[in-house]
Image (cartoon, grey):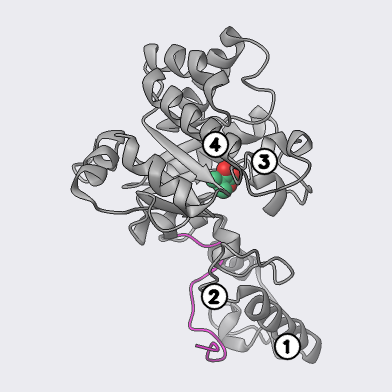
Amino acid sequence: MKADKVTIHTLQDKKARGEKIAMLTAYDASFARLLDESHIDVLLVGDSVGMVVQGHDTTLPVTLDEMVYHSRAVARASRRAHVVADMPFMSYQASLDEAVTNAGRLIKEGGAGAVKIEGGARCAELVSRLASVGIPVMGHIGLTPQSFHQMGGFRVQGRDREAAEKLFDDARALEEAGAYSLVLEGIPREIAADITSQLSIPTIGIGAGPACDGQVLVIHDLLGMNDTFSPKFVRRYEHLATRIRTAVEEYASDVRAGSFPAPRESFSLRGGGENGPTPARVTAIADVGGCSAPAGGGSPGHEPAAPAKPTSR
Ligand code: KIV
């Protein structure tokens, strides 16, 4: 393991030192590489993939096979970050044995360093079973999207005394069972602050105020990929929806005007082509258009070249 690799122990140490933990979701290798290079501590392969990538209204339809697939892509591209994979709806609720087998797939096939499960005290037995076979578990309480129907929608939780007390009980039960950290989602900041100060494991907040030991956001929300979705707890650091549309409209207009590709964005025959390709020239075409990926990424047969136009930055 690389010396600077973030592990569950790094996160515990950060809490002890009062250093905040930065966590974001990632679902593919391109984003995972960028976030890892930007020193994000934890990459969560969230079942939010069902909403932001697959286009569902909830996280409920996401399957274990899909989570394994996305987790593998993220793990492959992460050098420093700790990778956590969500256990999707109904992959851990039916039986403890099935849950252990399914969590094992996320670690073994998906390359994750830990799994995340939604639910409080009712998950304690599973947390300790997983911990006993060496699978670290991140808990998740408060607004738990997999309980969408039970909650009657995506609603802030723990606003009355009874509900707040249940959150404390759930948090303590998960810590005692062996969870190494805990996501607090959609709860009043005062409750999140108290839970954070009472637990020895790090809390990671989303819509839970500033006192948590760390924060997590869905990367698509942070980047403003969906301009119709702007909940109170999200801070947009970019407005990529607008920028992507502008870039794509420019591309389409260049294609329609015949100005893309320019000569320097295409290949030519070696030694000129006035008399049409000879067999030797046909070989030359095959050479430049070969299917190996260029070093540093890019599509097969795509030569990294200076952009035809300056970008908008
Ligand atoms: O699936 C997800 O993205 C999550 C985070 C928002 C905590 O569970």
Identified by mark 1, the residue type is Asp
In percent of width and height, residue 186 lies at 58, 49
In the picture, the disc for residue 141 is: 4
Indicate yes or no whether the magenta region holds residue 298.
Answer: yes
Q: Quadrant of residue 20?
A: bottom left
Query: Is any part of residue 87 visible from this angle?
Result: yes
The residue mark sitting in front, 4 or 1, is 4
Name the N-terminal-most of marks 3 and 2.
Answer: 3
Name the N-terminal-most of marks 4 and 2.
Answer: 4
Identified by mark 4, the residue type is Ile
In percent of width and height, residue 265 lies at 58, 81
Q: Which residue is mark 2?
A: 238
Q: Secondary structure at mark 2?
A: loop
Ligand 1 within 8 Å of the CB at mark 2 = no
Quarter of the image with the N terminus is top left
In the picture, the disc for residue 72 is: none
Among all residues in the image, which is located at the extreme front? 161
Q: Secondary structure at mark 4?
A: strand
Q: Secondary structure at mark 1?
A: helix
Identified by mark 2, the residue type is Glu
The local crowd at label 1, few if under 14, some if 14 to 19, many if 20 or more residues have their Cα within 10 Å, is some
In percent of width and height, residue 175 lies at 38, 26
Name the N-terminal-most of marks 3 and 1.
Answer: 3
Q: Quadrant of residue 34?
A: bottom left
